[in-house]
Image (cartoon, rainbow, N blue to C red):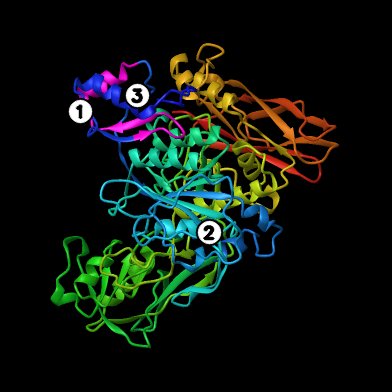
Amino acid sequence: MGSLPNRVSYSPTSHHLTMLEQISGDSGVENLLVQSYKRSFNGFSAILNDQQKEKLLNMNEVVSVFPSQNFHIQTTRSWDFLGFSQSIKRDKTIESELIIGVLDTGIWPESESFNDKGLGPIPNKWMGVCKGGSNFTCNKKIIGARFYGDGVDNARDNEGHGTHTSSTVGGREVQGVSFYDLAKGTARGGVPSSRIAMYKICSLDGSCSSSDILAAFDDAIADGVDIITISIGFSRGLEFLKDPIAIGSFHAMEKGILTSHSAGNSGPDPSSTESVAPWLFSVAATTIDRQFIDKLILGNGNILVGRSINTFTSNGTKMPIVEASCLEGFDKTMVKGKIVLCGSPWHEESAFESGAFGIVSNVELNDISFVSQIPSVNLDSKDYGIVLSYTNSTKSPIAEILKSEIFHDSTAPRIASFSSCGPNSVVPDIMKPDISAPGVGILAAFSPLAPPSGNVGDKRKVKYNIDSGTSMACPHIAGIAAYVKSFHPDWSPATIKSAIMTTAKPMNGAYNNMAGEFSYGSGNVNPRLAIQPGLIYNITKDDYVQMLCNYGYDNGKIKQISGENSSCHRASNPSLVKNLNYPALVISVFPHKPFNIKFSRIVTNVGSHNATYKAIITPILNVKITAKPNLFSFKSLLETQSFVVTAVGRVGSRQIEFSSSLVWSDGIHNVKSPIIVHIKS
């Protein structure tokens, strides 16, 4: 129902019940109402049939009606890899005033990563509560806890996911942390002195409903958080008014709260990103220079290197190998006590249940290692074929699976193969994802209630675990956004986002013929430069509202969304969506057809009082890109300058995308914006 009305006498819940009475013809509608959103925006979730849904849609005060769907959950070396060392310049006093809202599977409050030693009083601005359920205690680190959903009675983390993301964004410094002596070092979050508020939105089966996601946003905004991180998504991008994360984060944005959101793990397919709204900070996952490898020694002495996080020591013992038809299930008498060969991945749990000693799989994800429940190693097709050939060449094939070890990867950062990609399936003119951050092999705090491998039969209990996903990349960006905010507390969410995007490190490579920026956004995050970007691209709530007008929403919906008497300044014009003051430009064209496209942008000086910036544009074959003017002279801080980028040309259809960049440079700052030429089918 959009924003809350500015009326003192207005009671949202009473209004919601009245609406339910009108569509049901019954006064006993309390049991139909599931959630009433009344603290930060207006709306409710309820149990409705199709006829009642249609009646609601025809009510003037309703912006949208959509079914509650289940969303799914999507990181010690990573901070050092980003150049974000423990000695980096920071103000712990200001950081301790920052509150990070984490919407996730819960948190394990007893973890050492959430100790409150040395932290001062809880910030006065905090308006939240500690309602974590029985035997759940908050402290001066975890200052708030709430939980939602049927069957959920506490904010404790049963999955490990929420504890992992929480400690990544704001965990305290804990020395001597490892996963069974792997990846040993100091675990820490991006802003160790910050406060954490947990909003548990996922049930025990890992599903997270639209209804509960919206309820958590409603509470987090009203509670007074500064940054929100949510590593949860749907299978693909949803239209704005049917996407609870887009809706909740819009209302967070208008209150000055930046939302960091995971792009999804459905890559490298094009248009697979689940985070599409322009006000969201959409995060892709990259590798770091620490990788986990494992070795398989065959009976003939051949040593093959694969992937796994295998904590089991072999002590030189070689075990029999047997090839099995894994897709049809295991013959327990055949595989018991042996190393099983599987031509496909993801059969480890079945192998364990069948009594197998270990498993060797054929998996093409050569940039990621998973925690294993039994001795295991994942090989690429070529090496798997070598093992298969050896196994079939001798009567008694044997092998030894060694304990995993660390490998220094000099090619990092690279975009993770699983990381979801653009183009944006809902608004093609807005680049997604926005940025990339470490999301492969991240060690962080974990819940002892959750099996480290994710397999039910894994009875190990760990305090820290290694995990991979855009879920792990997302809190890295939330932590850096909080770090930037500690230096610039008055910066808007879009300003912080611009600072991080325009200072990102360049990256190479993508997994298909897309422009690399559709895989990794502006590049890999560079926290040291983000606090001094030189120029920023700001976007106000009114700018987003005008974009929604151009996107196609009518005046009635715009007024309800914004909560004001604002309306569209002109008729809807989809071609003007690209003029949103975004720090990236997407040029959508048809193959073999000439084009002449203009983009309007405004930059604000946040560097030196007196500065001159010159435009540097990377050329693209068959496309002429210019910026007018191509030289700026600033005389004061916060001074703004506008410019127009023009792209003229004609391109073929052999490649789907081409990429370029616009850099505004004063010799000190290099403010970089990606330019992507996207060829439409």
Indicate which disc residue 15 carries. 3
Q: Is residue 48 magenta?
A: yes
Q: Which residue corresponds to the image point at 54% horizontal and 20% vertical from the top-left? A: 575
Marks 2, 3: nearer the viewer: 3
Residue 470: tell me if it is visible. no
Spatial CA span between label 1 and label 2: 43 Å
Task: Give the numbered dot on residue 141.
Answer: 2
Q: Are marks 1 and 2 in contact (CB under 8 Å)?
A: no
Q: Which residue is mark 1?
A: 28
User: Given contact means CB atoms under 8 Å apart, are the residues at marks 3 and 1 in contact?
Assistant: no
Residue 182, horizontal then vertical, whole percent = 48, 74
Q: Nearer the viewer, mark 1 or mark 2?
A: 1
Kind of element beneath mark 3? helix
Q: Which of the 4 image quarters holds residue 595?
A: top right
Secondary structure type for disc 1: loop
Furthest-top residue in this view = 571
Is 60 above or below relative to 49?
above
Quick one: label 2, few (<14), some, or many (20+) residues within 10 Å? many
Which x, y percent locates residue 633? 83, 31
Q: CA distance from mark 2 to mark 3?
A: 37 Å
Gap between marks 3 and 1, in whole Å?
14 Å
Picture quarter containing residue 387? Answer: bottom left
**Crowdedness near tag 3: few (<14), some (14–19) or many (≥20) residues, C-alpha within 10 Å:** few
At horizontal 33% and vertical 66% (from top left) the residue drawn is 451
**200 or 416: which is nearer to us?**
200
Region rendered in magenta: 36-59
On-image quarter of the C terminus? top left
Which of the marked residues, 3 or 1, is nearer the chain's N terminus? 3
